[in-house]
Image: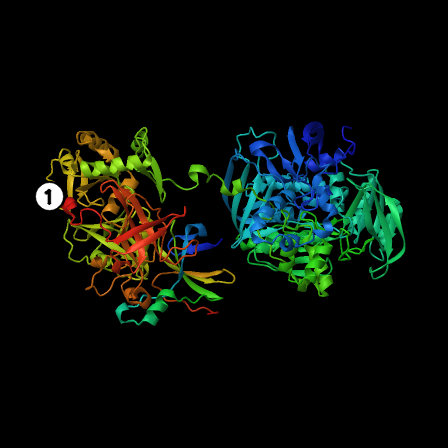
Amino acid sequence: MINRNRLFSGGLIDRNILIKFKFNGKPLQGYQGDTLASALLANDIHLVGRSFKYHRPRGILTSGSEEPNALVQLGKGAETEPNARATEIELYDGLEASSQNCWPSVNHDIGALNNLFSRILPAGFYYKTFMWPPSMWMFYEYFIRRAAGLGEAPKEKNPSRYEQKFFYCDVTVVGAGVNGLTAALTAARAGASVLLVDEKPELGGYLLNAKSRINNLDTKKWIKDTVKELMALENVTVLNRTAATGYYDYNYVTALQKITNHLPNSLSKQPRERFWRIRSKEVILAQGAFERPLVFSGNDRPGIMMASSAQTYVNQYGVLPGNAVTLFTNNDHAYSVAVDLISKGAKVIIVDIRSNISEKIRKLCEQNKIETYISHAVIKTDGSKKISSITVQELSEDKQSFVGEAVTIGTDLLLMSGGWNPAVQLFSQSRGKLKYDDQISSFIPDVLVDNQAVIGSNNGDFNLKQSLMSSYEAGLGAAHRTGNKQEVENFINDANEPIEFITAEVVPYVLGSKPVTHGSKHFIDFQNDVTAADIFLAQREGYVSVEHTKRYTTTGMATDQGKTSNVNALALMSHIQQKPVGDVGHTTFRPPYVPQTFGAIAGRNVDQYFDPQRLTAIHEWHIDNGAVFEDVGQWKRPYFYPKKVETMTEAVNRECIAARASVGILDASTLGKIDIQGPDAAKFLNLIYTNAWSKLEIGACRYGLMCNEHGMVFDDGVTTRLGENHYHMTTTTGGAARVMSWLEEFLQTEWLDMKVYCTSVTEQWTVLSICGPNSRKLLASLTEDDISNEELPYMRMKEAKVCGVDARIFRISFTGELSFEINVSARYGRYVWDKVIEAGKKFNITPYGTETMHVLRAEKGFIIVGQDTDGSATPSDLNMDWIVSKKKEDFLGKRSFLRPDTAKNGRKQLVGLLINDKKTVVPEGSHIVEEVSKQPPMKMEGHITSSYFSPTLGHPIAMAMLKNGKARNGDLVKIPLMNGKVVEATVTENVFYDKAGARQND
Amino acid sequence: MFVIKCPYCGERDQTEFSCHGESHIARPENPNEVGDVEWGKYLFFRSNPKGMHYERWTHDHGCRRWFNVQRHTVTDKIMQTYKMGQPKPKGIND
């Protein structure tokens, strides 16, 4: 046999397939079917890692997803996975894993010095010690985080692919133990579509390892037959290696399926994991129960393990983790483990804390020659990197004191059995209510939510035959409620277990050789290093509520979410507070049930798929012509077009000057466009915009401001009347969707009788905006229609053919120049653009981006909603009273202009600023202060909203929202900068260039 | 995550919808005749009950229609959905 602790036969491993792997660099061997934990135990490696806080040596405690100790760093480089549970990692050829939280090695760990100082490192230590002075926290934190910790996250980008799947079915069964299998098969036979998920590779659950019988068959055989039938049914989906991670409203269950994690090096084309989003009409929870540790002194050494897990290692993996075994128990169940171990050649001693054991158990011990210490406790354990001996002493009747002498017994494996905790996490997430059950001393489901069932030990039901009957009923009920009414005969005739778990006698903590609060280490939460003493401390210091105790001590807050520790912590709190556990309560269970990969939650929504990108029809041209892009909402817009050696400033200056001197061209396709039709369209626009729309002629354009009901500006744009009942509205690029929803909201919820239809046409049109003194000449060379100032004056629209393509030409201007916005069908957008560029060459046509657009409009004092406004500015605040109708009865926002706060004096108002030094471009967002002092705080009276160098004017210009700004023309204001300098500026009106508007009207 | 029955499309996942707060808050017919207190109530005051709540939802990634939802804020159970313009149903726990 290649492994020291491997049995010659038995288990579900394949002894013909040898697997090579490395742990901490050491080459080792295991078999197909092993987990990393079983292979390590087979190689007699118990020391796997160091604990979180005290760096104590830790081994393998369990055999499942509840494992708190055996966390390893799996793999290397970009694919490395921290905090992987060795008990869940399936062994594959070439696997490499290493211990975490130790330096230089797990055997010689410097951090273990923490253990020597553990008396001064109790719960709350960091809060109490490192909070002063506050400025030093950042410094302390660095060292604390280094000293206490888990694995390391990869620094590279995750190379794996993750998928997601939405799934709908009648019945979802979580857990494929014998009860889950029974419920799933019953529901399936009744005709329901069934999804069965189980986190293990092998279906069957715990009874794969036990010597029980169902229908007079060995359970393994019964499981095999049942799984076979389920797999063959077309209405059943079976997912192994799939952990249900969350259970939300309306039977929405999420599950993480591991697809290639167990395969050597992911050369596979398959995704690594798939995240399932399951919506099912009925959910049946059959997740089983976790065995509970006992709280005694030194209960955390390597070589101390849960009894049921040892049974799993023996029966499923053919590994006997120790030869001189001691079982420490408070219930009958452990005795069946003892029998299994003895049959494999181990020597077993049982220490039972109970005062009496039943006649049946006594006989079993006699038959199997098990040495028992009844009414005894393990009070001390020894051994440095693995357990070597224990000390046992008899307890008094009330378990509060010792009787007799302490005995030391050599042992190389100590098993704990403290009873069972139903895995109620998912049930509780679904808002099911729990109650404390005195018989099993744990929480069980009490009040179910709709369309749900909990079965088997998950429901606190540990009698095999009885629970299988209930599972049949649950499966049938779920099928019937989802309309699947086929008759299904009860196929469970008989079932029995050699020894049942009936009741556990809970002792909140076992007396040790030292008092529990003085230096002994009775661990409750292994992963977060929380001891019984910490729970005592929290109660003493007033953190008596369960939520406070949890946060103060951090019990149950590690990556295992307290699966093995929570109930023990509650039992101890109950003992200290002298009230029933049910009254202590429990903390809220939250998803995920087991750690869940971020990559799987994101699925394919990464990189360019994280958020949709919207591209105009001209996008490729922009790329070819060296555009630097800017994100505006989801749109990619050209920011500026630098020539080879140009800086951004140089490029923008050149673009600005070209646009004012000859012709500039802007891709304005991203502007929001809404087609509005219907007999009530004018009436509707009158209510939506602040100005009047009734008299707008067909073919005329008008600028409008929209306010919300608070009277605050929230979008602007030009709307054109195309026909009697037909309008074309434009909005800001970023506000398009918001405006569309706003229009629909009022049409659908307030003015239901209005006949108006709104359609988003943003992407249907390509908009080429050409501006500059030569723009008319350029356009005239591309159209045969008359576009003279008489035929197409400022703020008019004309339908014409441009380059032979149907177009709407709008004479509107955002730059203050003579300007034409040519709208053509997006299908012809690029064609027309190319023609315009070609024809424009003789005018030195210059493409410009959003930055130049911003500079040009700022020179004209045009606002950008969302930059110069922030949702707290009225039209009046923006110096735009001219656009607010005095005559209209009503429009959205009007009434709020009269609210005292909106109408008061001294509001922030839009002003222009001229920087006195004529060279500093003040950063946008800078504060204007009343008086400059050496240090903040300074009394703020406004802020800069727009700030640029104006190439046209040759000096910087800025706009600002300034307290009482309208009345402060000519005032000097002070703007302190981050670098300590103070800039002085003069308040002016916000139109800096061509105040009369001669250029655009030309 | 809820399953919501759109009155126009039928049952869909919550991800297709968005919620827009309390329903049945009518915009005053003549805002000019309404005093500041009443206008303030229309703008800012919502009932925020522990129990039955009547709220507006839109089926954004579907028919884009607005409709009403009667939901219990403690259990998150949706009692019914109904079209805009229909009167507020009488709930047991109002």
Q: How many marks?
A: 1
Tell me the amino acid under the disc marked 1: Asn
Which image quarter holds the C terminus of chain A? top left
Residue A288 visible within the image: yes
Chain letter, disc 1 residue = A
Q: Secondary structure at mark 1?
A: loop
**A60 lies left or right of A917:** right
Residue at 22% across, 44% down: A815
Q: As rendered, which of A6 and A409 lies closer to the eye?
A: A409
> Is the image coloured rainbow, by chain, by secondary structure, or in one colour?
rainbow
Residue at 30% across, 30% down: A643
A843 to A365, vertically: above or below: above
Residue at 77% across, 57% down: A507
Residue A198 visible within the image: no
A161 to A494, vertically: above or below: above
Residue lying at the far front in this picture: please name it.
A934
- Estimate the x, y position of residue A59 in percent, counting from the top left: 73, 41
Residue corresponding to mark 1: A789
- Estimate the x, y position of residue A990 in percent, counting from the top left: 24, 52
- Estimate the x, y position of residue A465 in percent, counting from the top left: 72, 52
